[in-house]
Image: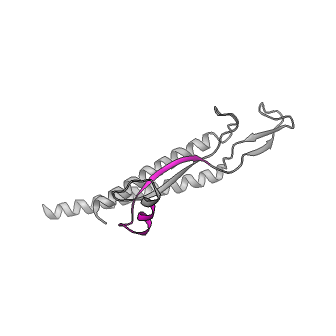
Amino acid sequence: MSWLRGLQAAGSGIIASSVRMSVIAENLANAEATRTVEGGPYRRQVVVLSSMAEGERWFGPEAFKRAIWGGGGPCRVQVWGITAARQPTKMVYKPDHPDANAAGYVEMPNVDVPMEMADLTVASRVYEANVAALQVLRAALNEALSLLA
């Protein structure tokens, strides 16, 4: 792997981790939101990531197959999209809540706070690992430059 591919891989990992942490923070902030603009409770958002080989478009099945099975292997990670999670919302008995139905149940968001905290820890560690990789690459490049001078 050349130094430029290393920069691309670590830099894209930092960006992807940053997006993940932002989405997780939004999920945590809306963990109790029972009303949204679209109607109904907040739906947990998830970040979909994809690998991308050098010089390829980041979408399409052919780009994905080449990144996995050949053509130099994956070089970067891209945020493919941010989508709503498929888990169902939770019905909680809160008869005094303004959004309670006739039976006293409120439809709550599908955000699981402990799971979000675990995901946040993972995203934070991935971010730190990519920063460390950039620091190692920078030190190696500085050493190479000092040998040339």
User: Is 76 part of what is drawn in magenta?
Assistant: yes
Instruction: Relative to 86, say whether 97 is above or below.
Output: above
**What is the image's colouring?**
one colour
Q: Residue furthest bottom?
A: 69
Q: Indicate the quadrant containing the N terminus: top left, top right, bottom left or bottom right.
A: bottom left
Q: Which residues are magenta?
A: 64-84
Q: Residue furthest left?
A: 149
User: What percent of the width, then of the height, locates residue 142?
Assistant: 23, 59
Q: Would residue 149 appear left or right of 23 to someone viewing this image? A: left
Q: Residue furthest right?
A: 103
Q: Nearer the viewer, residue 125 or 63?
A: 63
Residue located 72% across and 46% down the image: 89
Q: Would residue 120 appear left or right of 141 to someone viewing this image? A: right
Residue located 51% across and 44% down the image: 22
User: What percent of the width, then of the height, locates residue 99?
Assistant: 77, 33
Q: Would residue 95 appear left or right of 3 to someone viewing this image? A: right
User: What percent of the width, then of the height, locates residue 64?
Assistant: 45, 60
Q: Quadrant of residue 130?
A: bottom left
Q: Would residue 125 appear left or right of 135 to someone viewing this image? A: right
Residue located 51% across and 48% down the image: 81
Q: Quadrant of residue 69?
A: bottom left
Residue located 79% across and 43% down the image: 92
Instruction: Relative to 22, say whether 7 is above or below.
Output: below
User: Is 59 part of what is drawn in magenta?
Assistant: no
